[in-house]
Image (tube, coloured by chain):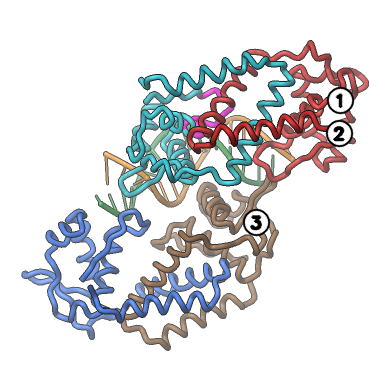
Chain colours: A cyan, B red, C brown, D blue, E green, F orange
Amino acid sequence: MFIEIMPNSDTPIYTQVMYQIKKGIVKREWGFGEGLPSVRSLAGDLGINMHTVNKAYNLLVEEGVLEKNKKGYFVREKTAIVADDKLQAFLQEKLQEIMIDKKIYAISDETFEEWSDTIEKDFNSEGK
Amino acid sequence: MFIEIMPNSDTPIYTQVMYQIKKGIVKREWGFGEGLPSVRSLAGDLGINMHTVNKAYNLLVEEGVLEKNKKGYFVREKTAIVADDKLQAFLQEKLQEIMIDKKIYAISDETFEEWSDTIEKDFNSEGK
Amino acid sequence: MFIEIMPNSDTPIYTQVMYQIKKGIVKREWGFGEGLPSVRSLAGDLGINMHTVNKAYNLLVEEGVLEKNKKGYFVREKTAIVADDKLQAFLQEKLQEIMIDKKIYAISDETFEEWSDTIEKDFNSEGK
Amino acid sequence: MFIEIMPNSDTPIYTQVMYQIKKGIVKREWGFGEGLPSVRSLAGDLGINMHTVNKAYNLLVEEGVLEKNKKGYFVREKTAIVADDKLQAFLQEKLQEIMIDKKIYAISDETFEEWSDTIEKDFNSEGK
DNA sequence: GTGGTCTAGACCACT
DNA sequence: GTGGTCTAGACCACG
């Protein structure tokens, strides 16, 4: 799996790590039940601090995406990942924000579709 | 126009104000060239800090949504509002995040459509 | 409120802080809705690190005991504090452990009652 | 005797083993003076590391619950098992924590009694 | 002034 | 070798 971090993005690093891991799961680069790299090794690979990775992992546990045991962190079984009310509200809010910006900046449906397709294709592309 | 602020949301207040204003424009509650409430009065109405409103207004000027002159802030002509590269990248990133969460939490296309429709309807509804 | 930390205890400091805060709520030294000391000031008072207090506060938010907004951390309304299954299982496990030790070490019911009474009295005593 | 280990519990495995053994003694599944399974065989049965069992056994010797001789580990005579100050303090602290949580989460006396009864019944039930 | 993020580095617990 | 805890200190975002 290729995790890319943009240190200068407005998005906090731990959030980026979270999404990159979720993306890896979506792309099936990590199967259910599979173990993730250790906190320290991933931190080393990405050139970031251990605590930052740790925070990302723990938040993913809270979200129900990962689980941890005494050996480390693992991808949880798919059946267990469910969006609670708070997360659904969060997604709806985010969706509304995008739709507002789409209107305000007069981004055409075509452009928007194009973006979606590119992302979707990325999901289905072979991981590294 | 009704601006609703959720003080306990994770979204910063100035961001909420920005989106509520943009939404007002989308809903045509504010026409192009129309003046916005003064920083002080809006802050008073919403019960928030003057600096917060000020920040929201100024960021909207930066984004090209508003313009400022000696009399105050005004909605800019529609033709002038264009998303620059940075904003486009930001929107694409946000779109990717939603799509990742949609997949991870196995949110059905139907549910997603439903959300979009609700938001869309809100855009076309009569503002209070 | 008097928070006492035992740096040499086996119990992690953040756990101690959590229980001291809950105890303060039980003793009604902190009312519902009341604000807690800032992360940094409490850390200063206790002579511990800011991050440790922060962790305690955030875990209490997860547990539903506190809530946070942009101004800081607050005691949540009592009605909202409910033990979920995991927490109930945890308490039952802990209860079983105590009962096992009670039997093994032949601690008399009288001694045990005495301990409970002392703790209960402490709950009802005037805070600092 | 049936020793059940929950690998995903927050409680360290050696602690779980310790309590399961104490529980076995309470349930009189192991009489005083009786020998315990060898470190290797128990570790094998439970599918855990030998060192982990070893640690549990040695800590129980320290606590005065077991004694060790050249032939292995044995349940010590009941009269010899006494809680020292440190252990008493530990139990009182644990008791206080449970009582705090009971109050905070508004767990009723009835529920609590029920839990105690269930545990007590387990103590008196026929072992496996 | 409040919390949030990130880093660097140390020591410990568990298996 | 894995994660957990704690510290010290810096910089930033928010209101």
Whether pointer 3 and pointer 1 mark residues with C-beta atoms closer than 8 Å, the reply is: no
Q: CA distance from mark 3 to mark 1?
A: 42 Å
Helix, strand or loop at label 3? It is: loop
Residue A79 location, quadrant:
top left
- Viewer-closest of D89 and F7: D89
Whether pointer 1 and pointer 2 mark residues with C-beta atoms closer than 8 Å, the reply is: yes
Position of residue C69 measured from the top left corner of the image (x, y, whole percent)? 67, 47
Q: Nearer the viewer, mark 3 or mark 2?
A: 2
Q: Chain of mark 1?
A: B
Q: What amino acid is at disc 1?
A: Trp
Residue A56 vertical position relative to residue A44 in the rendered view, above or below: below
Start and end of the magenta stretch?
A: A7-17
Residue on which disc 3 sits = C36
Position of residue C128 measured from the top left corner of the image (x, y, whole percent)? 63, 71
Q: Could you tell whether A95 is left or right of B78 in the image?
A: left
Residue on which disc 2 sits = B1
Residue on which disc 1 sits = B30
Image quarter hosting the N terminus of chain D: bottom left
Q: Residues within 10 Å of mark 3 (few under 14, many from 20)?
A: some
Q: At 67% from the left edge and 61% from the top edge, which residue is drawn?
A: C77
Q: CA distance from mark 3 to mark 2?
A: 37 Å
